[in-house]
Image (cartoon, grey):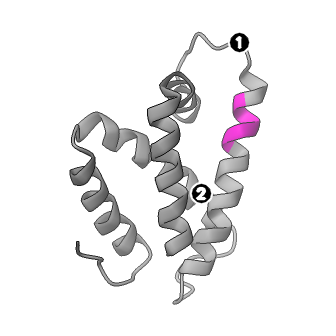
Amino acid sequence: MDKVYKFFEVMEEDKKKRNHLSKKIIHRILDEKSECNSDEFFRHWIDYLDSKLAVFLKSADKNNYYDENEYKILSHALIGSFFSMHQHYEKEEKRIKFFKKYLSRLLNSEVIHE
């Protein structure tokens, strides 16, 4: 779980530093039109993120709740959820609290309180 949380901490930092890149990634995840001309780069980048996160999710899923091929689907959904939270929660602390609850339930583990 620590690696999964760290993954999204890094995503949070990246969003703060390179908001334009994050917006383009959001558009690609949601299959929306974007002004970006490098579709292949973003498809590759999203696939890379999904693959890396899928490995972390599999290791965090102690109960083996998901099938082997479902971790990449789950990772794609989580990355989309991460960006969606930015639209709904302006305060970072509320985003983090919600995301930890969401992720804990998704992986059927204990909810982490702060």
Specify whether residue 38 is painted magenta. no
- Total number of numbered discs in the rendering: 2
Q: Which residue is pictured at 56% across the width and 57% down the height?
A: 75
Q: Pointer 1: residues within 10 angstroms few (<14), some, or many (20+)?
A: few
- Numbered label attached to residue 105: none
36 displayed left or right of 95: right
Residue carrying label 2: 73
In magenta, the rendered stretch is 42-46
| Image: 76 above or below 72 | above
Q: Residue 94 placed where, x, y %?
A: 21, 52
**Residue 25 figure quarter:** top right
Q: Which residue is pictured at 69% across the width and 74% down the height?
A: 68
Inspect this view and state whether residue 77 appears: no
Q: Residue 46 placed where, x, y %?
A: 66, 41
Quadrant containing the C terminus in the rendered view: bottom left
Query: Which element is circle 1 on?
Result: loop
Sequence-earlier tag: 2 or 1: 1
Residue carrying label 1: 37
Circles 2, 1 touching at the beta carbon (< 8 Å)? no
Q: Amino acid at mark 2?
A: Ile
Q: Real-space Cα distance between discs 2 and 1?
A: 25 Å
Q: Amino acid at mark 1?
A: Asn
Q: Pointer 2: residues within 10 angstroms few (<14), some, or many (20+)?
A: few
104 displayed left or right of 68: left
Inspect this view and state whether residue 44 appears: yes
Query: Which element is circle 2 on?
Result: helix
46 displayed left or right of 4: right
Tell which residue pokes out farthest to the bottom in this image.
Answer: 63
**Residue 105 figure quarter:** bottom left
Q: Residue 58 placed where, x, y %?
A: 62, 75
Question: 60 or 33: which is nearer to us?
Answer: 60
